[in-house]
Amino acid sequence: MNLLHRTRRILDAITEAREHLAAYGDNSWVTIDHHGPPDEVRKAVDGHIAMMEAIRTFARACVELEFHIHRGVDAIDPNAAAELRTEPSTSRHTAALDRTHEHRLSEDFTWKRPCALRWQERWVHDLTTWKAIYSWVMSEVAQFYPDVLSSLPDGPHAASRRGRVMFARNPDNMIAPMLIGTLCYETNLSANGIAAQIDSLRSMCGLAPEEIGVHLREDRDAPGD
């Protein structure tokens, strides 16, 4: 097994684990019976908080590990490093999706990969990751809705319901922050997590749900033959 193939498998495994855990964290909260006996609810919530902190610790380690892997390969073979920066492959059964079908942000995007975004009358193609879509939307908000952008660090969307920092003026409490102007925003989110963030931004910008559409290219966890 050559270096490139082995490294690709390692990066695939890291990506798979991060996506599974991000989705698991999203789903586990809603399984708690918040109307049950207070002691049981408190125990379940404390357990969830502890688990999410462990997931965040793991995700931070993954981000650092990916950085060092890419830097190490780049020092040996820059061409191989460039290839590794393309979206990871997967051992799952992958099925192509109808790229012409438009999806709403409220849908379930677990293991789905995007290809384009419609923002009102604008079409943006070649957005092949959820992170790329999120980055484009944040740039759009910064350009056309600066008041919305400036309100994010101090508004109700600055942190998630479970206390994760989503928007801030410094990246200290984030795992994979990106910067736009002086604002930092968290990108270590599941596909559904990013869709939810974009949907919140859509609402803050005064846009109707049907004014935003996502187009998908593949399902990476499709049923096998």
Image (cartoon, rainbow, N blue to C red):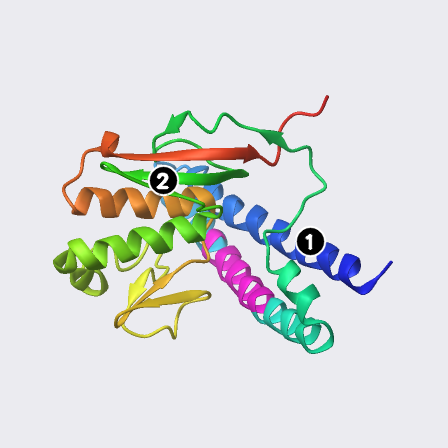
**Residue 67 sits above or below residue 212 on the image:** below
In the displayed orientation, state which residue is furthest to the right.
1
Q: Is residue 55 magenta?
A: yes
Write down the residue under mark 2. Answer: 117
* Left or right for 1, reference 156: right
| Within-10-Å neighbours for mark 1: few <14, some 14–19, many 20+ | some
Judged from the image, the secondary structure of the residue bearing numbered disc 2 is strand
Q: Which mark is residue 13?
A: 1
Residue, x 34% and y 53% (percent of image)?
Answer: 136
**Residue 64 sits above or below residue 215 on the image:** below
Residue 190 spot, x, y in % from top left: 47, 48
Identity, as a three-letter code, of the amino acid under mark 1 = Ala
Which stretch is magenta? 48-63
Q: Which mark is residue 66?
A: none
* Location of residue 4 (image quadrant): bottom right
**Residue 31 sits above or below residue 161 on the image:** above
Residue 36 spot, x, y in % from top left: 38, 37
Residue 97 in view, yes or no:
yes
